[in-house]
Amino acid sequence: VYNQLLSHKETVACLKERLRALDRSIHALRARRARHKQNNKPYFVLALSDRALAHLNTEKTWVEHFIREVERNAAE
């Protein structure tokens, strides 16, 4: 038996908070990467930042998609 712990509204609110946290992390990491680039850090330091940004952006895309899915299912 499926038992939903959060309402659709609560779920969307939590997911939107996660989006805000991801945006803050992405912003901070982009700023740090820019400082590294400005300070002529080695390519692998920039690559590590790029990898982390790729993961954060992928999660952000997934969360945005899941929010739409939750909202669509709330209408059913």
Image (tube, rainbow, N blue to C red):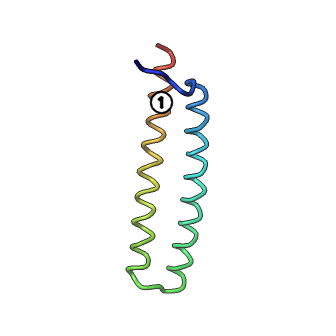
Q: Quadrant of residue 28?
A: bottom right
> Can you say whether 61 is above or below 10 in the image?
below
Relative placement, left or right, of 21 versus 61 is right
> Can you say whether 68 is above or below 26 in the image?
above
As drawn, the residue found furthest toward the front would be 1
> Can you say whether 20 is above or below 8 in the image?
below
Residue at 44% over, 64% down: 52
Amino acid at pointer 1: Arg
Residue at 58% over, 69% down: 31
* Mark 1 lies on residue: 68
Q: Secondary structure at mark 1?
A: helix
> Can you say whether 58 is above or below 49 in the image?
above
As drawn, the residue found furthest toward the top would be 76
Residue at 54% over, 27% down: 5
Residue closest to the eye, 32 or 73: 73
Residue closest to the eye, 9 or 28: 9
Viewport quadrant of the N terminus: top left
Q: Position of residue 61 (x, y in %)?
A: 44, 45
Q: Position of residue 27 (x, y in %)?
A: 58, 61
Residue closest to the eye, 38 or 75: 75
Residue at 61% over, 48% down: 20
Q: Position of residue 46 (x, y in %)?
A: 43, 76
Q: Quadrant of residue 34?
A: bottom right
Q: Residues within 10 Å of mark 1 (few under 14, many from 20)?
A: few
